[in-house]
Amino acid sequence: MINCSYNLKQITLLTLLLSWSGFVSGQVIRIPGDTTGRNAKKDSVIYGPKTTKFIYEQDLKYNRLNYQIIDTTLTGVHNFTRVEQLGNGLQYLGTIGSASTPIYPKPPQVIGATSGFNAYNMYEPSPADIKYYDARSPYTNLIATFGGQGRSAVDLTFTRNITANWNVGTNISTLSIDRQIGGRGVRQGDKYARSYYFNLFSYYRTKNKKYHLMGVLSRLNHRVQESGGIIESIDEVGLTEFYAYNDAIVWLTSASDREYRFRYHLYHQYAVNDLLQVYHEFNLYHQHDYFFYETSGKITNDYFKRIYLDSTRTADLTKFKLLENEVGFKGNLAALFYNVHVKLRNPRIEYPSDTLLRDTLGIRNNELYGGFDLRLDLGEKTYLRGGAEYLNTNAYVLEAAFNNPILKASYVRTRALPSYLSQRYLGNHNRWENNFGSVAYDQLSGSLEYQFKWFYLRPFMTATNITNPIYYRRDTVNNQVSRQAFPVQAGGAAQVLSPGVAFRLDFLKKMHLDTRVTYSLVSGRASEAVPLPSWYLFSRLYFANRYIENKIGIQLGLDMQLTSAYLGYDYDVATQQFFVQRQMFGTSSRTLPDNFWLPHPNYSAYFVADLFFVMQVRRAHLYVKIPQINQGIPEDGYFATPFYTGQPRVYVDIGINWMFFN
């Protein structure tokens, strides 16, 4: 009944919004002189993707008003999970809605103090990801997937112009995911993940375009029933026992992570003239992280080796708050764009379970920044830019980039403050107090692009040097290993070199092959902090064609991944932290190796293939997908994180992406 009730709420909400869309579509918007379309009436326009455009906040802030039209292509429509949409560059726990961390190192976007709780970032769009529309007619985009084994996802966007210069809209995204491992015997409706994201956005500008305002209010409520992974204390059976999926025995059955995020974001600017514009950016952000568990019982004691506060239950709560204001001047002098700004950040963190730590120095910060950006436009798609932002000698960023249709190159030098979590923390199972220094990143990246009639080629390379990285390492108690971790700071540096190539091959008129291959080499005294696969390959082979005067399009193909074996991160459920593997097992009599190799513990690479079929009928995209169709050939599965198996094969995932423009 719980499951049915939840789906009924989704259906009711979608029905109301689509009904609203249908009601407003009855209104006729006339545009004088525009007679586009074969059946267009005088002084009217046929509405569609070309009449609905959008920009991002960064386009306005940096004076590159690049309005884009709605993407209606078929490619990638079937990739409905966030991991797939983000290019499979994340290590996660194998189930939709679970925690994740980037595989390849990136300089931090924020150089000041942060919470350190980032495992669920991909389920909350940042202000830079919000699309602000200019829609001549009401626009609705419904994306719904009903996956096998109780996996469903819905994403709904609705927007319309109130006037020619004022647009409002909303985005609603939900996840409802059943347990994929250890779910046998669990009561009906006891989901692994439930997620609800909502935002309300608006874009206004005056008729003379001197004043612009963009704003978004958002809320994320993300809940996960943690399993702790499959119990590894199985001594007399083979590795295939780990691929029991729903029949697997997991550590935790009543543990849960809950994350609530609230954001109020505003950007507005006023143009005196082309040479001088004044802007203000405001950000108010709340992040609450909870971990709950009843700690009585043998399995619990075997899993959590340390208990600090309560031996009967765990109720860890962390509250992070941020108030941020940025004021700046910008403008254009011929082909030169400039931006000069000051920014005040006031981050703070609270651990309500620890009355002593709350008032300790470092819980609240006042950060005053100064910075600038310069860009020289050398053509429509060619520019040279540089910028800097400075807090103090421990926190700053320097950037330089060159971009044109063939060559792209960039350099970033960053020194970032440690997160609050890495410095001080007290929970029921983890406790530390550190005095870490800043972490420095130097990253140089570049790519070349060549587009021929039937062949596209993009070689690329990224070189990264990380000095004094902070990472998490496995905790040990009385010479016994645990699934908890604590932060450490390396005394040296790690160097990561990642060359690769992406190419697209069109052959036999209707066949296409898109491939990306990345090789990574890690070295240096702190190389332990950056576990990476030596090779990663993603390839999409598909047939594409159009029928009935191009009104119907189809794609049929395979998404394929191959990852070389490596010692990937393990996961601490109590603090949402991925940590490096060391001394995984306490005895040498185990049937498994001393370290858990990914994606397969027998030190081998693992190949994953997803079969998909996509059809476009007018403005509706329908797709069918079978993930891991190769399960059992030759292995019964793979691991996304130690003791967390990847998504098993399901009979079918069915989805629709439907756009309405009137």
Image: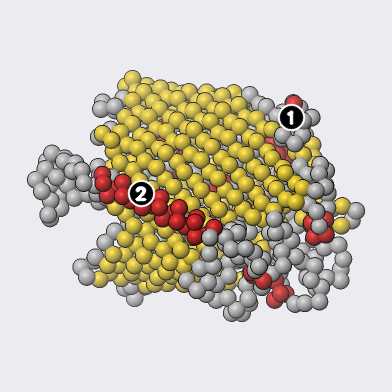
**Residue at 66 percent of width and 26 percent of height:** 365
Q: Mark 2 — residue?
A: 16
Question: Relative to residue 644, is residue 324 drawn left or right?
Answer: left
Name the residue at 58% across, 55% down.
Answer: 193
Up/down of 192 relative to 239, above or below? above
Is residue 607 visible in this depiction of the protein? yes
Residue type pointed to by label 1: Arg
The residues bearing labels 1 and 2 have C-alpha atoms spaced at a distance of 45 Å
Which numbered disc flags the more N-terminal residue, 1 or 2?
A: 2
The residue beneath circle 1 is 358
Residues at discs 1 and 2 in contact (Cβ within 8 Å): no
User: Is the residue marked by circle 1 packed among few (<14), some (14-19), or many (20+) residues within 10 Å?
Assistant: some
Of tags 1 and 2, the one toward the viewer is: 2
Question: Residue 214, position in %: x, y?
Answer: 39, 32
Residue 525 can be seen, yes or no? no
Identity of the residue furthest to the right in this view: 478
Residue 451 image offset from top left, x and y in percent? 37, 59
